Image (cartoon, rainbow, N blue to C red):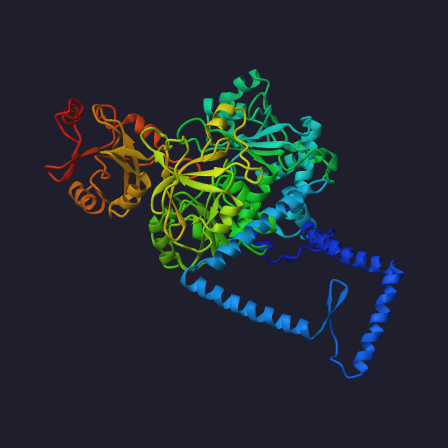
């Protein structure tokens, strides 16, 4: 049963009696049994060879006689049930091997210190990655396969009273979630007629029902399409259609949005249900009564008999910063691997992880909740991010691990300082998109928290983890990793929006220190499953004949740079970088620089088209700090001293709120379309005036002079 937050800490962490052996334990026991079986087979094989046994006895007799005559005594060593004799020569050989090993170790340490300072870290990270990959593949190769669902059920049997989800004042244990998801699965099967292989769209905010619905659908062998709960109208209909889901599960909290699209959904034969006790919307049935009345007995395994490594488990949509979102196909293998990412970053069984990220995205659902399902940890779920309540929540729930993405960390750094900023138990932060400047500021203000920054795309076929703690880096291109997942940085033409190819038609690798497009080879180990219902967009993300005829690489759409130590740094999105005055301008670099201005709270840099000019001209949308005013002369002087002339924004737009996605990514599309026309933009606009050495207010006269070319940019 659900409890109160105040009382869950007093429960026994072990969660009562163990009613089943954990699957993780079964893996270990299975491997041990195989090893023991191998030794027993050898012993049985020897026992069945009487002539061999007789010869061994004679040999022992001679050896015994030699020993009696004062010869060198024999020593024995046991290895996997066998006995091996070691004489004087063997001892000298072993001594030589030992000396060579010590010398090799000393040489390795020397190389490690002078030329390969990250050797052990690289090797350790590679072993961790390979171990996670083998663990996932071994699980899914079983019949029936061991998926993330079975791992969760193992924890539920072993520690049923251990908290899985904390939400406001509610406590949902592993046992609670197992029983609730059983009820939901049975109700979905009987009341909705769900069959294995169907896709169900889930249109919910961050609530506990999201998690038990996910588990219930997994028990039925159904895929879940995670609809962004902020979508409306045409975008929502498109997202549902992309996954071809004929059932939508939502809640009365979103009734206004549901009511708007319900006629279109009904026309397409889509059924909509609320996970509530009652429904305020005609034509939408409430499912909670049927769920409450259903049995909580375990669901039969036959629903998942056809589940394989490549079975479609989830559809997660891209952020949609440049258009309608695409439904990325997430297979059972990828669910398992992404859930293991939190483990690789340092999440442990006794941790309490705090996530404010939306569950409709891979970071919140698979790394946050999924990571806790994988290791058996506790997840504190919040409906929405709040900078003012973030650390209070961490103290309230005794949080040890936090999750971040995009600009979330900067929001925390921009919040008013408190005397108790360092009074918390957080030891680890897992996420991506943390800028170097914010990284340093965060550590200085909130204490020595270990930052585990990673890089990866929802639909991507590989990623990186910054396992060394190098500030600003997203990972390392070590030789071990490249052997596991082949990736390259290639030259990219920003103006033509395509990779640069040589005279033979192949792509060109960039040198260390140069920015290049990240591409990852598509293989059986690193597959790309594309987007649901859109083969053209899937094909668009594949680069072919990259280095040899017939090869295929995933086009990440991201520009990265590798330094001489092989650390990788995110530079920009392909569509965001623009070219001006013959130079490439990375918006993230300009944003990071402008963020240091004392009166700027947030900044979003983008390129706008100017008639008669090649390329795009830099423009910045800015939100001012509370109580601060815009200082054109100060900003001009700052950009002159810190940015190349081609990178300094020519236009500045002051906004009260900067538009972002649900995962804290800045939206540039509408800003680019509106450009710098003062006749249609009501926000304050400023123009960089080189004569006055200031950013001056934009007016129709300046705008007209720019258009007719009389005012040179």
Tell me where residue 296 appears, x and y as whole percent.
Answer: 72, 40
**Residue 691 seen in the current view:** yes
Going by the image, does 283 lie left or right of 613?
right
List the single residue furthest toward the bottom.
70
Q: Residue at x 51, y 23 (%)?
A: 259
Count of numbered badges drawn on the protein: 0
Could you say which quadrant of the image residue 338 lies in? top right
The x and y percentages for residue 45 are 83, 57
Q: Is residue 237 above or below residue 368?
A: above
Q: Which image quarter holds the C terminus?
A: top left
590 or 376: nearer the eye? 590
**In x, y percent, where is residue 379?**
55, 48
Q: Quadrant of residue 12?
A: bottom right
Observer able to see residue 171: no
Q: Quadrant of residue 329?
A: top right
Residue 633 spot, x, y in % from top left: 15, 42
Residue 496, compared with residue 397, is above or below; it is above
Residue at image position (16%, 28%) is: 699
List the single residue furthest toward the left.
Answer: 691
State the residue lying farthest toward the top. Answer: 267
Which residue is more in the foreground, 120 or 310? 120
Left/right placement of residue 409 relative to residue 86 reads: left
């Amino acid at each position: 049963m659900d409890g109160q937050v105040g009382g869950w800490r007093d429960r026994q962490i072990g969660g009562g009696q163990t009613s089943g052996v954990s699957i993780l334990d079964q893996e270990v026991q299975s491997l041990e049994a195989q090893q023991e079986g191998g030794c027993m087979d050898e012993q049985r094989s020897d026992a069945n060879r009487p002539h061999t046994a007789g010869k061994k006895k004679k040999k022992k007799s001679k050896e015994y006689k030699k020993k009696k005559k004062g010869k060198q005594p024999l020593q024995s060593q046991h290895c996997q049930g066998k006995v091996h004799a070691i004489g004087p020569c063997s001892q000298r050989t072993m001594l030589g091997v030992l000396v060579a090993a010590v010398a090799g170790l000393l040489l390795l340490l020397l190389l490690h210190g002078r030329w390969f300072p990250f050797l052990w870290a690289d090797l350790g990270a590679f072993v961790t990655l390979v171990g996670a990959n083998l663990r996932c593949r071994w699980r899914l190769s079983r019949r029936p396969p061991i998926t993330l669902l079975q791992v969760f059920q193992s924890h539920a049997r072993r520690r049923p009273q251990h908290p899985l989800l904390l939400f406001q004042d509610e406590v949902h244990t592993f046992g609670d979630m197992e029983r609730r998801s059983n009820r939901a699965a049975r109700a979905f099967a009987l009341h909705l007629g769900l069959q294995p292989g169907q896709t169900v769209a889930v249109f919910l905010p961050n609530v506990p029902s999201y998690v038990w619905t996910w588990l219930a659908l997994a028990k039925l062998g159904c895929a879940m399409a995670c609809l962004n709960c902020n979508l409306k109208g045409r975008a929502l209909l498109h997202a549902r259609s992309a996954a071809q889901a004929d059932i939508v599960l939502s809640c009365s909290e979103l009734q206004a949005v549901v009511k708007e699209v319900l006629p279109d959904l009904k026309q397409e034969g889509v059924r909509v249900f609320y996970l509530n006790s009652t429904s305020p919307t005609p034509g939408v049935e409430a499912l909670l009564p049927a769920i409450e009345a259903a049995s909580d007995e375990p669901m039969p395994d036959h629903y998942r008999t056809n589940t394989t490594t490549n079975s479609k488990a989830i559809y997660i949509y891209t952020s949609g910063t440049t258009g309608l979102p695409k439904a990325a196909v997430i297979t059972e293998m990828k669910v398992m691997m992404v859930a293991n990412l939190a483990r690789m970053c340092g999440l442990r069984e006794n941790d309490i992880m705090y996530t404010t990220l939306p569950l409709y995205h891979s970071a919140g659902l698979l790394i946050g909740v999924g990571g806790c399902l994988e290791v058996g940890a506790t997840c504190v779920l919040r409906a929405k991010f709040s900078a003012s309540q973030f650390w209070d929540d961490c103290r309230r729930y005794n949080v040890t691990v936090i999750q971040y993405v995009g600009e979330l960390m900067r929001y925390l750094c921009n919040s008013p300082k408190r005397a108790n900023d360092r009074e918390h138990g957080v030891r680890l932060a897992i996420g991506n998109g943390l800028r170097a400047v914010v990284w340093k500021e965060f550590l200085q203000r909130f204490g020595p928290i270990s930052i585990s920054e990673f890089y990866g795309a929802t639909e991507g076929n590989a990623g990186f983890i910054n396992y060394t703690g190098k500030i600003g880096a997203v990972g390392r291109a070590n030789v071990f990793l490249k052997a596991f997942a082949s990736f390259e940085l290639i030259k990219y033409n920003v103006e033509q929006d395509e990779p640069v190819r040589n005279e033979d038609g192949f792509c060109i690798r960039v040198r260390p220190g140069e920015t290049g497009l990240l591409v990852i080879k598509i293989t059986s180990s690193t597959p790309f499953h594309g987007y649901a219902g859109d083969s053209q967009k899937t094909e668009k993300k594949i680069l072919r004949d990259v280095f040899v005829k017939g090869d295929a690489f995933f086009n990440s759409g991201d520009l990265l740079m590798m330094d001489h130590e092989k650390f990788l740094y995110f530079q920009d999105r392909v569509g965001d970088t623009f070219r001006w005055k013959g130079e490439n301008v990375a918006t993230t670099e300009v944003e990071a620089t402008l963020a240091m201005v004392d009166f700027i709270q947030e900044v979003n840099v983008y390129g706008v088209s100017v008639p008669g000019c090649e390329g795009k001209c830099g423009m910045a949308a800015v939100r001012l700090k509370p109580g601060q005013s815009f200082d054109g002369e100060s900003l001009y002087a700052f950009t002159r001293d810190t940015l190349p002339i081609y990178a300094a924004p020519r236009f500045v737009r002051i906004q009260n709120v900067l538009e972002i996605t649900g995962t804290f990514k800045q939206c540039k599309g509408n800003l680019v379309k509106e450009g710098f026309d003062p006749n249609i933009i009501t926000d304050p606009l400023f123009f960089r005036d080189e004569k006055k050495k200031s950013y001056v207010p934009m007016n129709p006269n300046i705008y007209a002079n720019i258009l007719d070319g009389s005012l040179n940019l």
